[in-house]
Image (cartoon, rainbow, N blue to C red):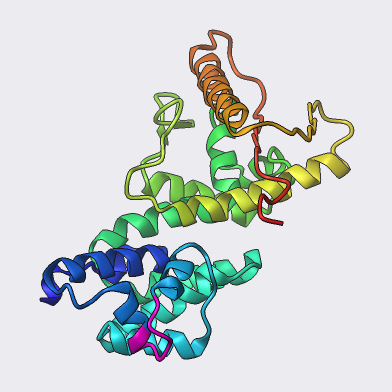
Amino acid sequence: MKANLPNIFEYNDFRKYLEDYQKSRYASDPAFSRSSICKSLGLPNTRSFLTSIIKGQKITKTFVDRFIKLLELTKDEAKFFSVLVKFNQAEDAGEREIYFDQLIALNRTPKMILVKNSYAYYKNWYNSAIRAVLSIYDFKGNYKKLAKMVFPAITGKNAKDAVALLLKLKLIEKNRDGFYKPTAKSIATAPYVHDEIIKQYQLQCLDLAKNALVKNHSLPQDISTNVLFVSKEGYTRIQEKINSFRSEIRAIAHKDENPADRVYQLDVLFFPNSRQDA
């Protein structure tokens, strides 16, 4: 029966795994309901506990161990599940990165080779910055100068490691003149790249935005903040406008007929600033 159940190593969210596992097993074993799961976990005969977890409630180490036993996970699966819970429940960016490194190390599936490559690219913000800088700078091997062209500045070793990674991933190549240049003007996130990898990258980008706000007074910047109060319908319309705006910006960058002379970062943030159930 285990062959028909979800593979824990293909998940980056333990809550989604629990939800899919319960649905999959329930399809062949109607006795494996949410209420029966709660009972097996030593709780009153109610389905609300599992539902609350799936919706975001945290679980303790005690219940992690109980789930491992209930789901009949192997030793390797149990280790992965335990770290995945810690990763999903961590609120500190540094802790998340530590746990994500552990998840990569614990995962033995062939699919994770692709994820490792993507993780290597998105793990450090300057990888994408170096790739962009190479499109406007004729680089042949002066890593110190390349590092200084990035803001905030990175080390020569950082620049060298980034170039080596970009070459490995075939995101840059030498042109006829011997300069390293991007192989494409823009790249899209591949389907196998997990949301959590991108989230780690976005956290770094937010730190860059803070740095720009505090230190970059001499550099051109356009930073604004708006606090809005709108209906659900208004929220949907704003989302549509943001998606349309991002598409237009990408199109402008892609079709820009003039030679690029600088690298910019654009972050668009739109998130709740209040609770409905307060």
| Residue depicted at 23% across the width and 63% down the height | 110
Q: Quick one: 67 or 215, which is closer to the camera?
A: 67
Which residue is farthest front? 45
Does 30 sit left or right of 46 as displayed? left
Q: Tell me the magenta residue range.
A: 39-46
Q: Is residue 107 above or below residue 127?
A: below
* Quarter location, residue 58: bottom right
Q: Is residue 161 visible?
A: no
Q: Is residue 49 above or below residue 40?
A: above
Q: Is residue 40 magenta?
A: yes
Q: Is residue 68 above or below residue 151?
A: below
Which residue is farthest top? 257
Q: Quick one: 183 or 45, which is closer to the camera?
A: 45
Q: Which quadrant of the rendered structure holds the C terminus? A: bottom right
Q: Which quadrant of the rendered structure holds the N terminus? A: bottom left
| Residue depicted at 66% across the width and 55% down the height | 277
| Residue depicted at 64% across the width and 32% down the height | 231
Q: Quick one: 91 or 17, which is closer to the camera?
A: 17
Q: Main secondary structure of the magenta part?
A: loop
